[in-house]
Amino acid sequence: MDKKTATDLAVSLRQEIDEHNYRYHVLDDPKISDADFDRLLRSLDAIEKEYPDLVSPDSPTQRVGGQPSEVFASITHRVPMLSLDNAFSVDDLRNFVRRALNLVPDAEISFIVELKVDGLAVSLQYENGLFVRGATRGDGETGEDITQNLRTVQSIPLRLQKPLTLEVRGEVFMPRSSFLALNEERERRELPLFANPRNAAAGSLRQLDPKVAAERNLDMVTYGLGYSPDFSPPSHFEALMAMRELGLKINTNIKIISDLEEVVAYCEGWREKRYELPYDIDGLVIKINDLALQQRLGTTAKSPRWAIAFKFPAEQAVTRVEGITVQVGRIGTLTPIAELAPVKLAGSVVRRASLHNEDILREKDVRVGDHVIIQKAGDVIPEVVEVVKAKRTGKEVSFIMPEVCPACGSAVSRLPGEVALRCFNLACPAQVMERIAHFASRGAMDIEGFGPAAAEQLLGAGLIQDVADIYYLPENKEALLALERKADKSVENLLAAIEQSKSRPLWRLIYGLGIRFVGDRTARLLADYFGSLDNVTEATMEELVNVPEVGPKIAESVISFFALDSTSEVIEKLRRAGVNFVQEQKAEEAGPLNGKTFVLTGTLPTYSREEVARLIEDAGGKVTGSVSKNTDYLVAGEKAGSKLDKAEKLNITVLDEASLFKLLGQGEQGNTIADTK
Ligand code: IVH
């Protein structure tokens, strides 16, 4: 494509993409499918790759850019970002109106009522229509420059529909479903959970690497103006409408009301209805609509006199503790749970509440038979706030945490520095299913056909009790065949996959054992450093902390893991079965893809790009981000974009997933994969 055609096409593609983005995010009325939208984006990306000087800062391809920052610069707000006074009752609301009327007795007041979305206040600056700077509220005078992170929020336009210079303010938030998904993912990766969507949104905006923020599915609604001397609509409502026309997303749950009693009724209406929203609100904001009147009323040092927040109290309920049970989590954590008389709270019926751990249970002194106040933290996870001591009859029974695991009966203890009691028995039935499934998973020992369902079935049938038993299944072929729906062929395949997994690289075994805090990266580092599983099991604290990236927390966890009798048993069983315990020769020296450089693009049919990259690296190949004349192969899946065009232009061999596996299959490492696919 010649430069002129490319320039014209880039301009029109950008316009088209912006328009669809606006329809999707602001109007909530998309006209094309996500796939078609992605196609437009990829076409634009391809043109920009070919002619990099055509890239403009507001191009929709440029949301995630730049290097992670070291610190956030500070930004002084030209107009302070104030906070709102709170009204907790109807009387508070009346007082607010009375105070306003005292100051402007001649005025006819009409209000605009908005939802108070529970997120983080930010300011966005546009210069000649271009988004140039974004900041947190900070202390109201000075905030932090989080422009790079805000650019990743899809509902924030990088260019306004008109070349205006203005500052707008609004709330960045995380929809509840994204929050739940994020926490689930974090739980799997043993990262600390976010308490509520607001904390998750704040945590995401404070990431130094914009790539992280980009993955967090943040959203934003605009609710006001900052320093905007050239922009003066007569009312707040008109300001909102004008902002919407400029491309900014506003919350359309707004209502203009002139009667105070109606305002109160409207607010009350949201008390229950709020649980139907896909995001959290913590109240409503009542603003005086007329902007001239707002000017006349002015502000106090802290908050405007023309607006007030009507806050819903954190919803609480009182109920009775009918029992206390102990739950054993995936990694053996014992959590005391209050079993409650069912009670309605924050839009759902609550029957159980977490008491978190032994310390909290003691501190709150929750007893069976107690009446307790419960609430939802961030309206998501119910917790016991406190005991209603006045309701005690003396018949309540204190609960003592068990000394043995309720699931398997082995002794429980605390790891140094941790509050939770844990069961360390590898064969504990509460943990074993997850452990076995993890061991066999693609990321670990990669046993094809051995997913969570198989783990559950084999456990249920008593054919396995721990991860090592997997390797003794061949001795039980008859029993396997007898299992429901296990045909001859699938049993053969499963046994073959199990056999192949015996020669996986050492790091996969270490990772597969499921040692707390040892993810796949740490497992690789341990394998590289110690060279054999036996060396890892015998490692001392001093040696462990010498491993790059390993600190005392991981080291302690490794030592306590290998000190357990149940661990030694499993390890001996694995050894007897012939599972590889040693670090293979460095892949660079031996792998079939030695010295070859790969680039990955598009979506592959079975493996994720990360998994494929790992397979290539295991086989001695190198994976880089962009196609150049040094690239040997491009592995292309569905929706491959500009990289494919470039590779074709440079005559680089393009592989699909199947042909990549053929290539891998020439070597020892690859055989296992090619055969099991
Ligand atoms: S107006 C001068 N409108 O609530 C203060 N605030 O408690 C202007 N908030 O910091 C704020 N939704 O983070 C306003 N529709 C809305 C809001 C809203 C949420 C937040 C905002 C503010 C806090 C004050």
Image (spheres, rainbow, N blue to C red):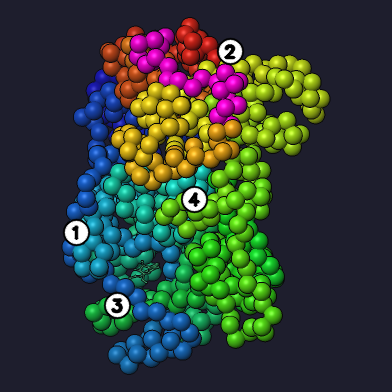
Where is residue 450? Give x, y as percent. 64, 28
Task: Name the quadrant of the N terminus.
Answer: top left
**Labels 1 & 3 near each other (Cβ < 8 A):** no
The residues bearing labels 2 and 1 have C-alpha atoms spaced at a distance of 58 Å
Of tags 2 and 3, the one toward the viewer is: 2
Amino acid type of the residue that numbered disc 1 sits on in the rendered structure: Ile
The residues bearing labels 4 and 1 have C-alpha atoms spaced at a distance of 31 Å
**Direction from residue 437 to residue 254 in the image, left or right:** left
**Direction from residue 494 to residue 274 in the image, left or right:** left
Task: Name the quadrant of the C terminus.
Answer: top right
Asked which secondary structure carries label 4, the reply is helix
Q: Label 2: which residue?
A: 675
Range shown magenta: 570-592
Where is residue 303? Give x, y as percent. 29, 77
Residue 183's disc number: 4
Foreground pick, 129 / 572? 572
Could you tell which of marks 2 and 1 lies nearer the N-terminus? 1
Amino acid type of the residue that numbered disc 3 sits on in the rendered structure: Ser
506 lies above or below 339: above
Could you tell which of marks 2 and 4 lies nearer the N-terminus? 4
Could you tell which of marks 4 and 1 lies nearer the N-terminus? 1
**Labels 2 & 4 near each other (Cβ < 8 A):** no
Residue 47's disc number: none
563 lies above or below 280: above
Foreground pick, 604 / 356? 356
Residue 303's disc number: 3
Residue at point 50%, 54% (across, down):
414
Q: Is residue 73 visible?
A: yes
Q: Label 1: which residue?
A: 75
The residues bearing labels 1 and 3 have C-alpha atoms spaced at a distance of 20 Å
